[in-house]
Amino acid sequence: MEGLDVRIGSLSLKNPVLLASGCVGYGEEIGRFIDLSAIGGIVVKGLYMKPRIGNPPPRIWETPSGMLNSIGLSGIGIHAFIQEKLPLLRETGATVIVNVCGETENEYEEVSRVCDATDGIHALELNISCPNIKENGRCPGMNRDATFSLVSRIRKATKKPLIAKLSPNITDIASIAQSAEEAGADAVSLINTLLGMAIDIETGETRTATGMGGLSGPAIRPVAVRMVYQVARTVSIPVIGMGGISTWRDAIEFFMAGAGAIQIGTTNFINPHVSIEILNGIQDYLVSRRQKLADIIGCCHIGPRR
Ligand SMILES: Cc1cc2nc3c(=O)[nH]c(=O)nc-3n(C[C@H](O)[C@H](O)[C@H](O)COP(=O)(O)O)c2cc1C
């Protein structure tokens, strides 16, 4: 269908449906269920320079309409990804976005430079919502200055499209988005998981070994829609929305709030075909209303129309 393509800096995505980081690994398993070239792109699991084991188990707990995870960014490292996983992904014709992580600004930059030099990696999603940066003990996405400093540095390290992935665990997400834009990001994506906690009342033990976890799935959707709405009214770069999208109707809500593209995360665990189903649903909706995607982006209005 025409009119579904989305521009992120110099990159043109064929449609606005992407797979979210951490919920589809490096594309191998999901690629057995869907044609990865049919969707807008795949954001692979967060990558550091070296492999990481992540947090000890238990690290997943199902909650009402969602799940808590404390995976702790386990991953194979950027070099193993490029050698072992990227060739397969390239064969599928997928648009590949690497979720870039770092324990320090230096490491973020190193991973970004490797991505910049690698054919077949189309864009970088900078995970500034990761809680492990050692330089200030907090994730850079929780602070305007840290966001500006990191995004400007990575902007200088890559010519590829740069997306800053924002944390919802702050009061004013729009000001962080503004910092990312001022520092040269081509787009922002939001939201990462919301910090949560669950406790076994028989034993008093927390349900995840690290105590807290990131909440995802339909439970967080209204928070995500609200944040997309706030951010889209503040920045002029594209906003990629996510958080609990499980049907095409949810996706339309995000577009109306101001997202130019969407990512689907947790729902892939329940239905690996969901991204294609959502893409088809979006197309049918637009055709039935004789509209283009651009017509509905940010079209929501507060309360009933008078
Ligand atoms: C198991 C799991 C692992 C995740 N790993 C990452 C990650 O490596 N990097 C990242 O930026 N976000 C990660 N996320 C966050 C998702 O990409 C997404 O922002 C969040 O889950 C909200 O979308 P959803 O409700 O559709 O899952 C992870 C989420 C889950 C559930």
Image (cartoon, grey):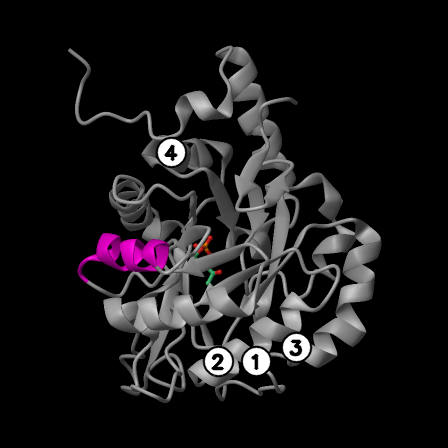
> Residue beneath label 4, please?
253
Disc with the residue nearer the chain's start (4 vs 1): 1
- Mark drawn on residue 102: 2
Coordinates of residue 292 in the picture (x, y in percent): 51, 19
Residue 130 sits in which quadrant? bottom left
Q: Secondary structure at mark 2?
A: loop
Q: Secondary structure at mark 3?
A: helix
Which of the two marks, 3 or 1, is nearer to us in this view?
A: 1
Q: Of callouts 2 and 1, which one flags the residue occurring earlier in the amino acid sequence?
A: 2
**Circle 1: residue type:** Glu
- Helix, strand or loop at mark 1: helix
If you read the primary sequence from the N terminus, does the residue marked by circle 2 or circle 4 appear first?
Answer: 2
Q: Who is closer to the viewer here, 302 or 157?
A: 157
Structural crowding at the residue carrying mark 1, measured as other residues with C-alpha within 10 Å and reported as few (<14), some (14–19) or many (≥20) = many
* Quadrant location of the C terminus in the rendered image: top left
> How would you rate the neighbour count of disc 3 (Cα within 10 Å): few for under 14, some for 14-19, many for 20 or more?
many
Type of the residue with mark 4: Glu
Q: Which mark is residue 110?
A: 1
On the image, the x and y values in percent for residue 142 come to 27, 70
- Residue at 59%, 68% in the rendered image: 45
Start-end of magenta stretch: 171-182
Residue 133 visible? The answer is: yes
